[in-house]
Image (cartoon, rainbow, N blue to C red):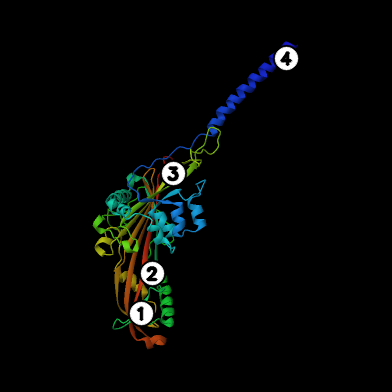
Amino acid sequence: MKKVFIKSISLVTALILMMSLFSACNGKKAVNRPTEAKIKTDIGDVRFTFAYGDLRKAGVSGDKLASLFENTNKKTDDKTVTLSYFELVSTFGKEEYFDNILALIPQEEFVKFSENAERVLGYFNGMINYIKSGADNSVRISYREEFWINHGDDVVFKDADGKELPNQKELRAAFRLYADNSLKGIGNVLKNKDQKDATEYGADLTDEMYVFGSKSASSLTVSDLYTDKENKIYPAYTSVVPTLAFDLDEKGNNAKGEDGEYIFVPTEWYRTINICVKPEEESVKKAFSVRTADEILKYFDVAKTYMTVNSYDVSFDPCYITAGINAVNDEMTYCTYQKNMTVTMNVTFTGALEKYGTMLITFPCTNQMTFDIGWKTAEQ
């Protein structure tokens, strides 16, 4: 009996050992480290490294510092974070201490913007032109067009001789009404403003993507790009941001390096391309579709009861292209074109505003087109 009992115990022990080994194998599967994603094309992204202490002294608030260094265990002044220029502008661009942060970057580092502009532009041109060609029947697009008028402090009123007039609340109120009514009219010519429609995979995009009517989407060269260092405008640059997952140790815990910091593995890479085009019609037309002044401004004729538009002039301001790209497979996901313009109108006021006579009104406006790009998967 005793012998049988021992055998039974041995059998149970063996079963337990087998189960524990099986569980250990399953456990190993459960703690597999995430697969590290690699960037497909390295085009010299513009990134800068900042120390925690330097950012603190530059005026960055505690909550923003905590967010920037959220993956850092011990936040000492010597800890560093690497940020792209795109991240800098989007995070701090409107802060009064933004210049203090830029001052932390050695001047020689800013040469990166001009050094890789040609490479960035070549990468963008190749990609956007491939998409417009149909991308071997694997791409579809949807799009939306927007237009807005700035009727704030940037609106300038001048008399018929070009002398700037003092601030007039009544005129500004009238112009605000004028702008709002104009936008209702302009809405009639915007393409797919509600983004209800999308093309089929492999559809002809000649008249669906900029430049409308052309087989090409961009013929921009470096000479068409705009730089204004004083206003922090750079010609063409990219920034890549990873999606991070914890690396795990053999027990399934978040792994730590020798310095005690958690180890992260990039599982995705997302690239943003920023391009600034010269405010010259010849350059703008190489990547943007441009309506004539008559096509747009005829919809401004909505204020006949209190003013008449005698003549007008439209000029370009720096125009921007922003594209989002899956940097692991080089597939563009969206591309936004921001066409900035300044309109100067010669108007004669009538009715309740007749006392103002004839004057010049100058105001900025923006026409924006966004293309969202879908790629066919293996299952489609």
Disc 4 to disc 1, C-alpha distance = 103 Å
* Quarter occupied by residue 17: top right
Residue drawn at (47%, 51%), measured in percent from left and top?
77
Could you tell me which secondary element the residue under label 2 belongs to? helix
The front one of 111 and 138 is 111
Sequence-wise, the earlier of marks 3 and 4 is 4
> Is 194 placed left or right of 136 in the picture?
right
Give the percent coordinates (x, y) of residue 319: 32, 62
Residue drawn at (24%, 57%), measured in percent from left and top?
223
Could you tell me which secondary element the residue under label 3 belongs to? strand
Tell me, for residue 186, which label it has, or none: 2
Q: Amino acid at mark 2?
A: Ile
Disc 3 to disc 1, C-alpha distance = 51 Å
Pointer 1 local density, CA inside 10 Å: few below 14, some 14–19, many at least 20: many
Could you tell me which secondary element the residue under label 4 belongs to? helix
Q: Amino acid at mark 3?
A: Glu
The residue under label 3 is: 268
> Does 267 appear above or below 227?
above
The front one of 210 and 151 is 151
Foreground label between 3 and 2: 3
Sequence-wise, the earlier of marks 4 and 1 is 4
The residue under label 4 is: 5
The front one of 235 and 326 is 235
